Image (spheres, rainbow, N blue to C red):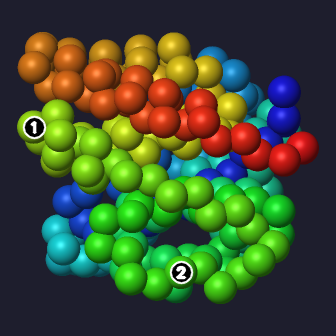
Amino acid sequence: MQKRHDVILTGIGGMGVLLTGEMIVRSAPAQYKNVLWIPNYTTAQRGAPCDCIVILSDEEIYSPLVDQTEAVVVMAASQLKAFEKRVKPGGFILLETYGLEDKAARTDIRVIPMSAVETAAKSGNILGANMVALGMYVEISKAVVPEHIEKTIGKKFAGKKKELHHNLELFREGLKMGTDVNLPG
């Protein structure tokens, strides 16, 4: 198993971007000695761009600031151009297709289309798109064991039976969507 994983999650406030990063970092201590979550958002919170950096490592994390990561999860297509350069060569972008007008310009990274918004909408609640994205990221990157994420979702939504069921269902759907993606190496 790889000793370090790093990812940037980006989107628009209100999409659950920060929650998605938090889910990863709260699930990771079962596998990693060091975990880090750095949220970045404006005072507007909803409707404004936001992102977070997540670093999982068995080695000491010397700096929370990273220029490039192995993966970027773009949950709002409008953020593609701003974050495309933040992927390490050989890394991947998990790119939401809803509202997508641009294409990635780089050829040294893998761009993986993701229909998280459409998948969540079909379930009756678009608010779960972040859980679809989380499932896809977990399945593709193998950064965190899915069962650890499911436990964290269970804790986060304890006492909210409907939300818990919905979020687990969408996370698992994201896992299924990610099984069709094969990364080189």
Residue drawn at x 45%, y 53% as measured from the top left: 114
Number of residues whose C-alpha sits closer than 10 Å to that of mark 2, classed few (under 14), some (14–19) or many (20 or more): few
Classify residue 146 by image quadrant.
top right
Q: Visible in this render: residue 135?
A: no
Residue drawn at x 35%, y 38% as measured from the top left: 131
Number of residues whose C-alpha sits closer than 10 Å to that of mark 1, classed few (under 14), some (14–19) or many (20 or more): few
Q: Secondary structure at mark 2?
A: loop
Horizontal arrangement in the rendering, residue 72 relative to residue 182 (left or right): left
| Marker disc for residue 159 | none
Residue 148 location in percent, x, y? Answer: 52, 18
Residue drawn at x 69%, y 22% as measured from the top left: 31
Q: Tell me if residue 62 comes above or below residue 156 in the rendering.
A: below
- Looking at numbered disc 1 in the image, what kind of residue is underneath it? Gly
Residue drawn at x 31%, y 22% as measured from the top left: 168
The residue closer to the viewer here, 87 or 45, is: 87
Horizontal arrangement in the rendering, residue 129 relative to residue 68 (left or right): left
Q: Quadrant of the C terminus?
A: top right
Q: Quadrant of the N terminus?
A: top right
Q: Secondary structure at mark 1?
A: loop
The residue closer to the viewer here, 55 or 168, is: 168
Q: Residue furthest right?
A: 185
The mark tally for this picture is 2
Q: Earlier in the sequence, mark 1 or mark 2?
A: 2
Residues at marks 1 and 2, CA–CA distance in whole angstroms: 29 Å
Q: Tell me if residue 64 comes above or below residue 181 in the rendering.
A: below
Residue 179 location in percent, x, y? Answer: 59, 31
Classify residue 5 by image quadrant.
top right
Classify residue 133 by image quadrant.
top left
Can you identify the residue that label 1 sits on?
124
Horizontal arrangement in the rendering, residue 145 relative to residue 11 (left or right): right
Can you identify the residue that label 2 sits on?
103
